Image (cartoon, rainbow, N blue to C red):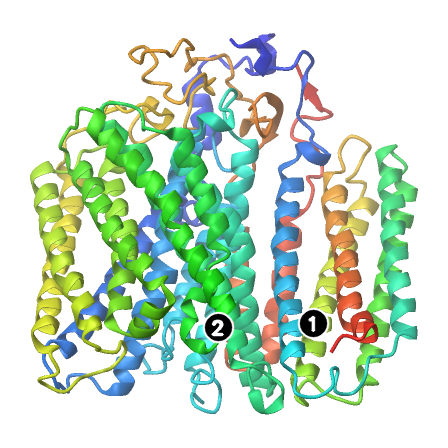
Amino acid sequence: MADTTFQSDAPALDPNLAALWETRPGFIGWLSSVDHKEIGKRYLITALVFLLIGGLEALVMRAQLARPNQTLLTPAQYNQLFTMHGVTMVFLYALPMLSGFSNFLWPLLLGSRDMAFPRLNAFSYWVYLAAGVFIYSTFLIGQAPNAGWFNYVPLAGKEYDPGVNIDVYALGLIFLGVSTTVGAINFIVSLLRTRAPGMSINRMPILVWGTLTASVANLFAIPALSGACLLLWLDRRFGMHFYDPTAGGQPLLWQHLFWVFGHPWVYALVLPAMGIVSDALPTFCRRPLVGYTAVALATVATMVVGFGVWVHHMFATGLPGLALSFFGAASMIIAIPSAVSVFAWIGTIWTGRPVFKTPFYYFAGFILLFVIGGVSGFMTAAVPLDWQLTDTYFVVAHLHYVLLGINVFPVIGGLYYWFPKFTGRMADERLGRAGFWISFVGFNLAFLPMHLTGLRGMPRRVYTYPANMGWDLSNMAISIGAVILAIGIGVTLFNFAVSLRRGAPAGPNPWDASTLEWSVASPPPAYNFRRIPIVASRHPLWEDRLEHVEARSVLESDIVLDRGRETIATTVLDAEADSILKMPGDSLAPLLLSLALMVFFFALLWSGWWIAGLAGLLCVGVTAVWLAPAAEPVVAEETARG
Amino acid sequence: MADTLFPEGPLPVALTGRLASGWYGMIFLIATEAALFVYLLFSYFYLASQAPGPWPPSGAPDLLVASLNTAILLVSSLAAWLGQKGIETGARGQLIGGLVAAFALGSIFVGVQIHEWLAKSFTPATDAYGSLFFTITGLHIAHVVVGLLILACLILWAAMGRFTAARHVHITVGLLYWHFVDVVWLVVFTSLFLTPRLGFG
């Protein structure tokens, strides 16, 4: 292949690439960066902040509930707190955190220089931030959303909730949906088009499978939520009747739409996190993942079945028995693909030679919590038992085991695992293990007794309870556990803060891992790969030591692409090179469009129709400038090369 | 180097059609937008199935004007397609002609829709059917307006000479959206205008 295809005649490679790819210094440069690593880190930090806010809200509630008949909070304050706790954790922490990992890691895992749509990537972050600000905008004036994170009508209707609270919820989630949707599209197209040559779909890391599955699901799930919220806002603001049974509407319509979204969404919150474990755990077991193909297929299968289980949130609403049986059975079937993954992880540990580093503890702990959360989920899939347990603390226990167990534990493990790649330094091991054990003990002390509290009939979402109902001891234990868990998270964050400055330098591959992100410096250069790798197996860095792997990947290929911001595009299944992608540079357009959208949504909230119209026009203008075709191609008349 | 991973000939740099990332991006945008209409139509049929009285309460909507309007929208898709065929051979005049015709027909469609709205005997606040009818058709009109804005940009850029036979990915991708808007209307038209006459409800 002729050199001129992939390399200009510039003498020095690294300075040339750096000049092409690095973000300009200064505040404007920072605001206009489209570097996926920069955006990924912003996602991670912002999501961590929301995790802390949501955690503080939980601690205040646990202080209120530690003993019976307390009056620390008024019922109205309690309603806002548990609603914002749920909204924060489910919408503003859990998925954005995983998007942070995927944004930082995808191009590095896939052997590419950036995501397929770098500016859209920046846009999805800014919209996420703006929507977070929007959703919290009325918190300090005591008008935050207050009808629970799944916000059932008629409680959330105008009649029972006349303030601005629910309007913030409805518009805020539509706004946030924009971010999630464009992010999902970016992941999918990046996967389809920007993998390194040779990375056929059977060689992709499982994290990529997890995020791909979650992204495709989001494309079809988010519109159900956005639609439901739009109808709710129209009901509230313009007197329409979608949920109003006195004029032909149905309150159950909200529940159907919300859970058609909600159940795939909870899988979107866990599948990428399970992918983190599937990719990182084997590094600490010194062997490839057991059952790669089965785990990849189980990931997809979980989501496919996950679109057919939403009614298990509605067992107690009086739907026909046949429907309940179908959805109960479908919910139980989910146990099968979940178990496939669990046995694959156990098999990996069992047949490997475990190295007990901090991430390993988090991943091993995660497996236990996943099993406990899975079992309680299986129990509530049984319709008669669900009738007994619905709206009790048993369900709260279950959802915290799955969401903290399958999201937060892998996330912290993943933060420890990729901390050297993010920062160039190692996190401290002793603090890391201490943080794990404190968190693990605190978590179980907080949430295991909740099962019992629920079985003894304590309903969720009550702001206090009378003494001597059999709930006193467990509630005190739960509150103490919550504090211990908070201390554990605090130790972890302290560790990150200290290690950021004082940690030992990491080097490219401190864990001796097998995937492409560990073949480049820590932190990686702006252009990721000096030369685009050519991939020949699932474990490019382990090929020399694995038996039965004949193929050898080429990390120092002749694909340089230093004539501009460029990366290579490959075919969808087999990853054969088929074109050269010109990548856009830094731009302020994503930020401007996000700000215009924020003005638009605030104007809708306060019925400023003229302002909304002007902001809408601004959005159109910025988008048109953003997407306008270049007056002259960067390289005049160049249509093909080679 | 594994030679099978690289084609024999040159690698394209100016990308059109399915080589361009934008083409894929638009396909998935369309998928998620289509899902939104699916959920709205689900809401329509769900509330219809639960309705205590006749559905629609005011009788099936009039077909004549809506059918003609449907034809107008379909012809606009055809015009846009002819314009795209033009630029593929470098005929810029054909491109602009097709786009302008599509824009004009799309605008007529919106005008007729608004006229139909004003002639309705019910409002969005009358009952759940009114809410559904105006919201679903309104959301579709909003999509047509976005499509018109896209067409306007494409016409402007075409007039500025930004497109050639080799470089016109904006046309391909932008017109995908316009065709999508038309197809969605066929589904909305079938659901809101035809099914009530098929004995539904």
Q: Nearer the viewer, residue A333 or A548?
A: A333
Q: Are marks 1 and 2 on the same chain?
A: no
Amino acid of disc 1: Ile
Residue A488 spot, x, y in % from top left: 12, 53
* Image quadrant containing the N terminus of chain A: top right
* Image quadrant containing the C terminus of chain A: top right
Give the residue drawn at x 11%, y 51%.
A491
Residue at the disc numbered 2: A255
Q: Nearer the viewer, residue A241 or A531?
A: A241
Residue A624 appears in the figure: yes
Q: Is residue A434 left or right of residue A600?
A: left
Residue A588 appears in the figure: no
- Report the disc number at residue A59: none
Q: Nearer the viewer, residue A334 or B118?
A: A334
Give SS at disc 1: helix
Which of the 4 image quarters holds residue A467?
Answer: bottom left
Using the image, determine if residue B67 lies above or below residue A375. Answer: below
Residue A140 spot, x, y in % from top left: 31, 78
Give the residue drawn at x 21%, y 71%.
A455
Amino acid of disc 2: Gln
